[in-house]
Image: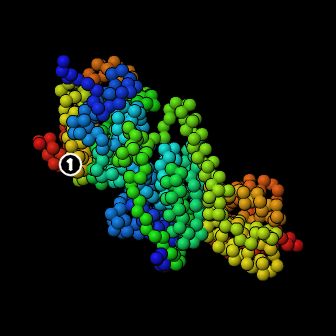
């Protein structure tokens, strides 16, 4: 029987991770994600797990690289400036194809910015973030329940694709409390990956190697195209395959004259806006990407045939709007409204924007 | 006929790519011999650094991770925490360990991670073409200290063994060299001690090997070892700085 409790988003990630078989956490303190390491520092020892407070984010992500190389389900978490520091390690992890879960509880930037919620790390999250030609799978929850569910899904995707998975949250989702139905615990066997260092199965190859260096140009090109093909498989699975419905939520889009687009906490405000629009006779709909990379472009390609306008709302100066524009490909107008610096746009402000587009006079 | 010398089991058959006279090959062999003698080959995992020994994983017939520059002790921490039954070692140069990876080595040592670190100190960056290292001697000319290292602007040679020995957690910290056969045997003993301590779960062990870089020093191998003896050893004094469990006496 699944267990329903009241939890903060950051804590829900921690508990869900433990239940998904994660026994290793390496991190460095930063606001506004501190509840997560605090929770795991207490919880992991209860299940004979390991919590290490590293000397830096750089060290933490490299501990993740090591633990993932050794076959564990492993995670780290941080917030924007800390995630920038982790990018070196993420690039190595992606290159060496090591599964792991990364959490970014996004705060305002650039630089030290502030500790208020933001969505200004979208580009960093969806474009790889570090150096080289690679991708991370990016999941964007909008509730405490999804923080838990996507943590479990994130570990499964990471193992399936041998790729780092990034849970892109924000300071609101991390800090707010909601009821959450916790996933049932699973047993994860650290000896389940035969490519891992120290793997002990009888089918072990002569020796296992986790590396991202391919000095020979032909070898590296082959490796790059191998990664690319893996990303294509992921894109197909999330756009038209098994995970098509997981990747995106559509709400009242069929007859919509304007479609609002937002992810994470913004999508919940947009849902209110859609209801208010409908009450005022404006046929509004909502598209919420739940997976930010691979981006659910197919939904926009389809909806541009039936709607008149798109309005993208973000807590940034406009980042995801570029992906929406690429998907709509100039066939319908794509508008943008954003607030930054930790300011969360109100439904009233967004309604005004809708009015400007739909009822310009 | 009795065979008295052969390739250690823990070395692969791949020929070393190192420059003629380089000490890396010698130290690789010593590590491999120790792993064979301690009968831990099937459970030893190495972590290769960035630098000339970036391809160390090609030469050891062991499971290996190739880490980012300076991060090997953090990667080793992750591996060891997941597989405490494994023997985990890093192999790092002076740029890797004493410059970009200073935080990682100090804190792995301070946590007392039950790993072994072999630190090759040849006072120069080898792979990138001979730049000044944190361990470069005062007055020593390199690609990026063409007038000789000047303490007033570039600081002084950093003594990693002495620094690490100030920490409470490490079990074993020693500095050795392979400039002659007697010292080579002492180096092997030090590496043996370090791995033995790890095998017994006694904590962090650190072996600094003062080494040469004939190519970037611009000297012949024999002259390089002479130069090492006359110039490096007075600065980097050989000896054991910490031996909590008295492994050298046992």
Q: Quadrant of residue A310?
A: bottom right
* Residue A219: x %, y % from top left: 53, 33
The one nearer the camera, A188 or B85, is A188
Judged left or right of residue A86, residue B104 is left
Judged left or right of residue A41, residue A358 is right
Q: Residues within 10 Å of mark 1 (few under 14, many from 20)?
A: few
Q: Residue furthest bottom?
A: A279
Judged left or right of residue A358, residue A166 is left
Q: Secondary structure at mark 1?
A: loop
Q: Residue furthest left?
A: B249
A207 versus B147 height, above or below:
below
Please tell me which residue is depicted at 54% across the width and 35% down the height of the picture.
A220
Image quadrant holding the C terminus of chain A, namely bottom right
* Residue B3: x %, y % from top left: 21, 22
Q: Residue furthest front?
A: A202
* Residue A130: x %, y % from top left: 55, 48
* Residue A345: x %, y % from top left: 67, 72
A2 versus B209 height, above or below:
below
Residue B102 visible in this rendered orientation of the protein: no
Please tell me which residue is depicted at 29% across the width and 39% down the height of the picture.
B41
Please tell me which residue is depicted at 40% across the width and 33% down the height of the picture.
B58
The residue pinned by badge 1 equals: B200
Model colouring: rainbow
The one nearer the camera, A315 or B229, is A315
Q: Quadrant of residue B218?
A: top left
A47 versus B234 height, above or below:
below
Residue A249 visible in this rendered orientation of the protein: yes
Judged left or right of residue B122, residue A118 is right
Q: Quadrant of residue B249?
A: top left
Q: Chain of mark 1?
A: B
Please tell me which residue is depicted at 59% across the width and 63% down the height of the picture.
A140
B44 versus B142 height, above or below:
below
């Amino acid at each position: 029987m699944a267990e329903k409790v009241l939890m903060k988003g950051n804590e829900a990630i921690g508990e869900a991770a433990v239940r998904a078989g994660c026994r290793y956490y390496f991190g460095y303190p930063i606001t506004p994600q501190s509840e997560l390491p605090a929770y795991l520092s207490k919880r992991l020892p209860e299940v004979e797990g390991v919590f290490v407070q590293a000397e830096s984010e750089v060290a933490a992500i490299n501990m993740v690289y090591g633990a993932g190389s050794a076959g564990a389900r492993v995670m780290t978490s941080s917030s924007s400036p800390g995630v920038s520091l982790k990018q070196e390690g993420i690039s190595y992890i992606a290159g060496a194809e090591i599964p792991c879960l990364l959490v970014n509880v996004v705060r305002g930037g650039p630089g030290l910015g502030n500790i208020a919620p933001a969505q200004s790390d979208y580009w960093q999250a969806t474009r790889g973030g570090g150096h080289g030609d690679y991708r991370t799978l990016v999941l964007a929850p909008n509730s405490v329940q999804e923080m838990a569910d996507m943590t479990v899904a994130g570990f499964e995707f990471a193992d399936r694709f041998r790729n780092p998975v990034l849970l892109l949250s924000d300071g609101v989702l991390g800090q707010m409390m909601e009821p959450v139905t916790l996933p049932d615990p699973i047993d994860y066997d650290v000896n389940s990956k035969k490519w891992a260092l120290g793997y002990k199965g009888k089918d072990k190859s002569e020796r296992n190697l986790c590396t991202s260096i391919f000095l020979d140009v032909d070898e590296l090109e082959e490796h790059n195209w191998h990664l690319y093909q893996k990303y294509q498989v992921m894109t197909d699975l999330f756009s038209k395959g098994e995970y098509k419905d997981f990747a995106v939520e559509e709400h009242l889009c069929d007859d919509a004259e304007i479609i609002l687009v937002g992810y994470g906490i913004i999508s919940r405000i947009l849902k209110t806006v859609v209801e208010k629009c409908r009450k005022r006779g404006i046929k509004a709909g909502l598209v919420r990407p739940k997976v930010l990379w691979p981006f659910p472009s197919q939904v926009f390609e389809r909806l541009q045939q039936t709607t008149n306008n798109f309005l993208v709302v973000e807590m940034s100066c406009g980042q995801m709007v570029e992906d929406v524009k690429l998907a709509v490909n100039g066939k319908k107008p794509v508008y943008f409204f954003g607030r930054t610096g930790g300011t969360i746009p109100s439904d009233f402000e967004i309604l005004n924007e809708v009015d400007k587009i739909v009822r310009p006079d | 006929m009795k065979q008295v010398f052969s390739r250690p089991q823990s070395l692969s058959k791949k020929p070393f790519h190192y420059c003629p006279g380089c000490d890396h090959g010698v130290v690789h062999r010593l590590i491999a011999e120790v792993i064979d003698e301690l009968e831990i080959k099937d459970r030893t995992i190495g972590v290769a650094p960035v630098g000339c020994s970036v391809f160390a994983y090609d030469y050891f017939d062991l499971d290996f991770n190739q880490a980012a520059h300076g991060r090997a002790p953090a990667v080793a921490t992750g591996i060891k925490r997941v597989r405490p039954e494994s023997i985990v070692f890093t192999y790092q140069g002076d740029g890797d360990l004493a410059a970009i990876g200073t935080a990682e080595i100090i804190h792995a040592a301070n946590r007392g991670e039950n790993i072994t670190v072999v630190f090759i100190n040849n006072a120069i960056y080898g792979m990138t073409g001979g730049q000044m290292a944190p361990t470069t001697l005062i007055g020593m000319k390199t690609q990026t200290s063409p007038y000789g290292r000047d303490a007033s602007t570039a600081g002084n040679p950093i003594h990693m063994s002495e620094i690490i020995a100030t920490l409470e957690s490490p079990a074993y910290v020693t500095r050795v060299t392979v400039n002659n056969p007697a010292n080579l045997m002492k180096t092997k003993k030090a590496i043996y001690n370090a791995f033995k301590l790890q095998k017994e779960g006694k904590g962090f062990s650190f072996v600094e090997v003062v080494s040469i870089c004939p190519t970037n020093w611009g000297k012949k191998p024999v002259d390089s070892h002479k130069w090492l003896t006359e110039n490096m050893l007075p600065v980097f004094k050989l000896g054991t700085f910490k031996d909590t469990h008295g492994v050298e006496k046992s």
